Image: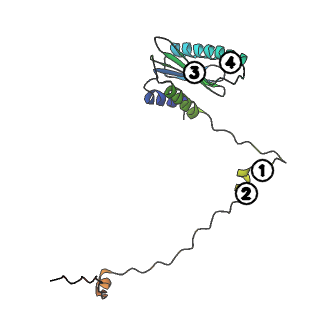
Amino acid sequence: MTADSALADLIEISSQVEGAVLLGADGSVVASTLDDARANALAGAARRLFDAAEEGEREGPGARPLTQLEASTLDGSIFVVRDGERLIAAITPPDPTVGLVFYDLKTCLRQTAAPPEPVPSEPGSKPTKVSRRLAAAEPPAEPAAETKEQPTQSAEEAAEKPKKPRRTRKQPDAAP
């Protein structure tokens, strides 16, 4: 899916997102639902906000990479989500459903991601469970041999055939 169509879907599906911008690894705007000036302003603000929050995270105990953040004001919120080197930023009105907005942004990022390239196995590497299963799997079965078609009866032939009487259950005699 293209970045433009993924952002269009995001705006259509997520009623809380008023605008969104997708940033490339270099911080440039890849796609946006906003005009150029607002897209560049949102992209710059999102990048600075994310970098500042990430810097603070690196200094804390047990630091892990920052993947998402929300900053809210009385006028609305800004959401930023990272997937690898790419970022997506969105603006919402005040009091959005935070979990839903994050979910929608992550889904949008996944839709625009390039499919992963297969990793070639190195010589001498240990086979995985999946590769062993695939190697042990039986080859696909041959197509079934064609069966002879049974001749069909015409309506006249079926009518000429005597019908077997139907069995019926004997009803008990009624008491007088």
**What's the distance in space between the residues labelled 4 and 2, CA to CA?**
45 Å
* Image point (45%, 28%), residue name: 14
Q: Which mark is residue 135?
A: 2
Q: Which residue is mark 1?
A: 127
Which label lies toward us, 1 or 4?
4
**What's the distance in space between the residues labelled 2 and 3, CA to CA?**
43 Å
Circle nearer the N terminus (2, 1): 1
Query: Looking at the image, do the residues carrying marks 2 and 3 touch, with CB atoms under 8 Å apart?
Result: no
Question: Percent x, y for residue 64?
Answer: 69, 24
Which label lies toward us, 4 or 2?
4
**What's the distance in space between the residues labelled 2 and 1, CA to CA?**
10 Å
Q: Quadrant of the N terminus?
A: top right
Question: Percent x, y for residue 45?
Answer: 58, 13
Secondary-structure class at tag 3: strand
Q: Which residue is mark 3?
A: 80
Q: Could you tell me the amino acid type at mark 4?
A: Glu
Q: Nearer the viewer, residue 144 or 135?
A: 135
Q: Is residue 106 left or right of residue 13?
A: right
Q: Is residue 21 left or right of residue 14?
A: right
Where on the picture, by quarter, is residue 168?
Answer: bottom left
Q: Could you tell me the amino acid type at mark 3?
A: Val
**What's the distance in space between the residues labelled 1 and 4, CA to CA?**
38 Å
Secondary-structure class at tag 1: loop
Q: Which residue is mark 4?
A: 57
Q: Which mark is residue 1?
A: none
Whether residue 57 is situated above or below residue 105 in the rendered picture = above
Q: Quadrant of the C terminus?
A: bottom left
Q: Could you tell me the amino acid type at mark 1?
A: Pro
Query: Looking at the image, do the residues carrying marks 2 and 1 touch, with CB atoms under 8 Å apart?
Result: yes
Q: Could you tell me the amino acid type at mark 2?
A: Ala
Where on the picture, by quarter, is residue 105?
Answer: top right
* Image point (46%, 26%), residue name: 11
